[in-house]
Image (spheres, grey):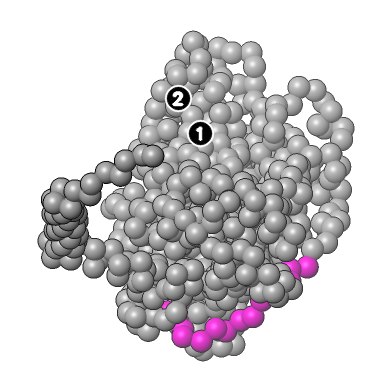
Amino acid sequence: MKRRSIKDSRGEATLFRVRAVVGFLLILIGLGTLVARYSYLQVQRHDEFALRSENNRVKPRAIPPARGLIFDRNGVLLADNVPAFRLEVVPEQVSDMKGMLEHIREVVPLGDDDLDAFRKQLKQNRRFDSVPLKLHLTEDEIARFAINRWRFPGVDVVPYLTRRYPYGPLFAHVVGYVGRIDADDLNHLDADRYKGTSHVGRSGLERSYEDMLHGEPGYELVEVNADGRVQRVLETHAPVPGKNLYLSIDVRVQKAATEAFQGRPGASVAIDPRNGQVLAMVSVPSFDPNLFVNGISKADYTGYMTDEDKPLLNRAMKSAYPPGSTVKPFLALGGLEYGIRRPEDTVLSTGEFCIPGQQRCYRDDTRGGDGTVNMVRAIEKSTNTYFYKLALDMGIDRLSSWMGSLGFGKKTGIDLQGEAVGILPSREWKATRSKYGWFPGETVLAGIGQGYWNVTPLQLAHAIATFAGHGTPYEPRLVMATAAVKERPVPLPNPASGPSLIHKPSEWNVVNQGMEAVITGGTAKGQFTGFPYVVAGKSGTAERFSRRSNDYDTNKNTAYLAARHRAWFMAYTPTDAPRIAVVAMLEAGAWGAQDSGPIVRKVMEAWLAAQGGAVPAKNVPESAIGVASSAPDEPEDTPVATPADMPAGPPPETPSNTAPEDGGNP
């Protein structure tokens, strides 16, 4: 039988007391630690955690500014903002971005362009900034997403304003268009200024005046729940809308100029010689800028890029062509300014001109020549021989210096980006491109606007406007005034860019007399019959390549010549106080006056109608006009025109037996 041990009550009591003390100490340490941590969090770091908590409940949300509107000179709306809806994603609220994109395509169709743009912006934006996924949702897409909204946390439909161009192609090259902001844009745009903004100016005035049109963003503080859904708006700081632009262009003149081309590739520019304001600027063919606003489809873009007529090219300022005989009045003025010619000096035109000591001769366009001609007669008949000799006597150095002072060979300074500089023939220009020196024959060709010459329609319009303004140059301007919201337009100053280039009024009168004679009895005779004002002008027919055979003489039919010529015409009116100078250029025209002259006339007729049918003039009796008052030039508050489709059709038939009016080639 096992012996029972005696219980040690005293020892057990001691052990219990030790364990109780240790337990109590552990409890005290735990409570002390908890109190210390509580004090640290709630007292020492109270402000920090209170702010964090508030940030989880209250979030800032950017409010993009309304983009400034664009009007013509009479207040006709050319670029508008219309309500639309887009799909936006907040990346930090999406746990599986790849899965979300796969499933949401079943609800809202997404193109590859949408996904590419979204992924690029996703890399650039902060995770708590919303990123556009699809722009311009249809009503059906909005309805389908609303039903499936619960499946896509962090994705929502957001209202916004999108750009719309009511006149479509009519102002595409001038106003331009906006496009979606991509990753490349984010590298140079001010991130704070473009918060919440999805579009930026891509071309035309939309790009040139981006800083003015964009405005300043605002923001609002919103209260959100645990799911990130907005519960209420706590505070709002309104954005500052962009400024409105008022153009100097009249939509009626622009429309008339476009229709006058009848779909034939070319360009036209009209300028007010008194201040440099551009009254019309047309490039044909054009394109629909609305297609680019929310991302043009690959099919549409490919169609534009492969079109042989290049509708995306702004021919008015980005394409340069040989000017032909349109340079002759300017060359004549240079001869007077340099003292090389007097108005009464004559030259005998026999049909060809030979440089002394050389066997090669250069031809007049008229067989047998024009006989003895002075300066006025030479401009009227566009006599090549007169200007061959004048160019040689002037020399290429003085010729290029004088023509350069009129704006050739450099940018005009118009308020659009991407202007071409063209080519002004000179020794310096050739030295950078050829190891050979300058030859006298090249000077001869420069005297009739051929050879190395290349000018843009804008440059020629700027030059003739400078001449029409009695030599005072103004940089061409499209925007004549700006206005903040609910404020009156503020005119933008455009002072003369230099003193007058003409030192004697008599010299201007001589050249003007020659250009008037072009209209009344010269190469453009009959083109302005019945027009109520005296018009001065000059035609130019520049060949694309030199004649190398008699094929030119035996095939003088309209189709053949039109395939070889650039047809120019420039004019201004009224000649006693010019208020409009117009240039028109057809890429394929038989003769300058015959093909481009009617375009210039239609532009002038539309301009005259826009003035109310009359302008102050000294050389036209008021009874011949029939209207005693003119319309104001300042922009009005109310639009005066509505969008209209532009009819297009085949070019008119031209008589094939028409005699050439200027030519101008060796």
Earlier in the chain: of badge 1 and badge 2, it is 1
Image spot of residue 147 (x, y percent): 69, 74
Image spot of residue 505 (x, y percent): 35, 56
* Residue ID at (51%, 15%): 434
Give the overall secondary structure of the magenta segment: loop
Position of residue 536 in the picture relative to residue 643 (left or right): left
Position of residue 8 in the picture relative to residue 374 (left or right): left
| Image: magenta residue range | 634-647
Image quadrant for the C terminus?
top right
Indicate the amino acid at tag 1: Ile
> Camera-side residue: 330 or 314?
314
Membership of 502 in magenta stretch: no
Indicate the amino acid at tag 2: Trp
* Residue ID at (70%, 27%): 546
* Circles 1 and 2 in contact, beta carbons < 8 Å: yes
CA distance separating discs 1 and 2: 8 Å
* Residue ID at (46%, 85%): 637
Which residue in the protein does label 2 denote?
A: 429
Which residue in the protein does label 1 denote?
A: 423
Q: Is residue 618 above or below residue 154?
A: below
> Camera-side residue: 250 or 72?
72
10 Å crowding of disc 2: few (<14), some (14-19), many (20+): few
Query: Is any atom of residue 414 visible in this view?
Result: no
In terms of image quadrants, where is residue 333? top left
Image spot of residue 73 (x, y percent): 48, 75
Label 2 SS: helix
Give the number of callouts: 2
